[in-house]
Image (spheres, rainbow, N blue to C red):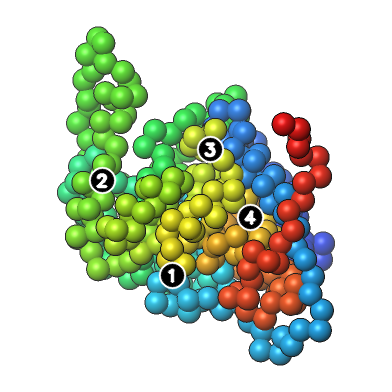
Amino acid sequence: MTPTRPPLTTLPRDLLSAADYERLAPDFILPATWAWLAGGSGDERCLRESRAAFQRWRIVNRVLQDLAGGHTRVAVTGRTLAHPFLLAPVAAQKILHPEGEVAAARGAAATDGVLVLSTLSSLPLEDVAAAAPEALRWFQLYFQPQREVTLDLLRRAEAAGYAALVVTLDAPVQPASRRALAAGFVMPPEGRPGSLARYAPPPRRELGADDSVVFQGLMAEAPTWADLEWLLAQTVLPVLVKGVAHPDDVRRLRALGVAGFVVSAHGGRALDELPAPLDLLPAVRAAAGADALVLLDGGVRSGADAFKALALGANAVVVGRPAAQALAVAGALGVAHLLRCLREELEVVMALAGCATLADITRDALWRDRAGEDTSC
C-alpha cells in the first residue's frame, strides 16, 4: 500500500511555512504512519504542552535600531553555522520518503544546516555520509546492550566523518504511542535500522516469576553514569547529551566534560508528565553556565518559536516533526525550503525586535502572556 500522492518535485505557491507542511503531509503519508509520526506517549500531554509553552510568551518590538550588519550565524562545536536550525534525529525516514535520510541530509546541506542522524536511521550511516558528503552531519547514539556494538557504532561514525555525537538518555524505556497502536502501525521492512543490520541481536534475557518486565527486563540494559564516562573516554568528538531536564544532572554532566546539552522531551514520546522543554530551558541554562552549548528540541514550528527559545537560553534549536513532514511532502527540496522559511521568519522577527545577531536576543525581548492562566491562590 502506498500513499495517495507521490512526493512533490515543485512547490506550490501556498506552501509557505511549517504549518503548511503539517497540513499537507497526511496526503503523502499512510494513515497508520501518520499516527506513528504525529503521536506521543500516554495521553500526549507533554506533546501538547511542548507547543503550548511557546504561546505563553510574546515578543516585544524595538524601534530605530541599526541592523545593517544583521545575520543569523551561530558558533556550535567549533563550527560556524549559517542559522540556528538543526534537523532532529528522526528514525526510519524511508517510510516517509523513498530516499529517506539521504534526502534529509541533502536538504540540510543546501541551506548550510546540520543533520543529526539517528541510530535508528533506515539507511546505514555510511550510506548517508557517502550520498551527501557536503552535509554537516552529527550522529545520534543510543547505547546498545553490548558495549562492543556501541563502540563499533562510534568508530563507524568517526570514520564516516560525523562531526559530533548526540547521546540520547531520556528514553531507556519507550512508552507505547496509543495513537499508533490504535491505527495498527507496524514498522515496515524499509524502516528497520540500517546501521544496526550487521549486528546480531543481544541474548534474550530470562525473567524470573517475580521479576518486573521494566526494572529487571528493559532497564537492565539501560546506560548508567559509568557507561557515559566510558564513552567519553573513547572519542575526541564533541559529545552532547540529549534529554537532560534536572539541573543536578546538568551540573554532573558538565563536570564530566560533555560538550553540550539538548533540552528535549523526546518529541513527547517518553515521560508524558515531563514539563515542556521550553519551560525547562532556563533552569538547564542556569545549571550549565553561560558559556555552555544548550540546544532546544521540542515544539519549534516557526522563526518566532526559535526566537523565544534563544531568548530563554538556547544557542540553537532542533526541528523534528516539521522536517519529517517536509521530507514526506517534497524530499530534499521540502527540507531545504522548510529551513529557508524558518530562517527567513527568524530574520523578520529579529529585525522587528531590534536584534541584529543571535547574541542580541535576550530575555528582555520577551513578555510573559498570562491571558487565560489561573492566577488564583
Q: Nearer the viewer, residue 18 or 131?
A: 18
Of mark 4 and mark 3, the one earlier in the sequence is 3
Say which mark, if any, is on residue 225: 2
- Residue assigned mark 3: 274
**Callout in the foreground (2, 4):** 2
Residue type highlighted by circle 3:
Leu
* Left or right of residue 280: residue 339: right
Residue type highlighted by circle 2:
Trp
Marks 2 and 4 sit apart, C-alpha to C-alpha, by 30 Å
Of mark 3 and mark 2, the one earlier in the sequence is 2
Residue located at (56% from left, 78% from top): 73
- Residue assigned mark 1: 291
Circle 4 packing at 10 Å, graded few (<14), some (14-19), many (20+), is many
Circle 1 packing at 10 Å, graded few (<14), some (14-19), many (20+), is few
In the rendering, at what x and y percent does residue 272 appear?
A: 54, 33
Of mark 3 and mark 1, the one earlier in the sequence is 3
Residue type highlighted by circle 4:
Val
Q: Which residue is most to the front?
A: 377
Q: Nearer the viewer, residue 230 or 249?
A: 249
Residue located at (33% from left, 20% from top): 213
In the rendered image, which quarter contains the N terminus?
Answer: top right
Dot 2 lies on which element? helix
Q: Which residue is most to the bottom?
A: 68
- Residue assigned mark 4: 300
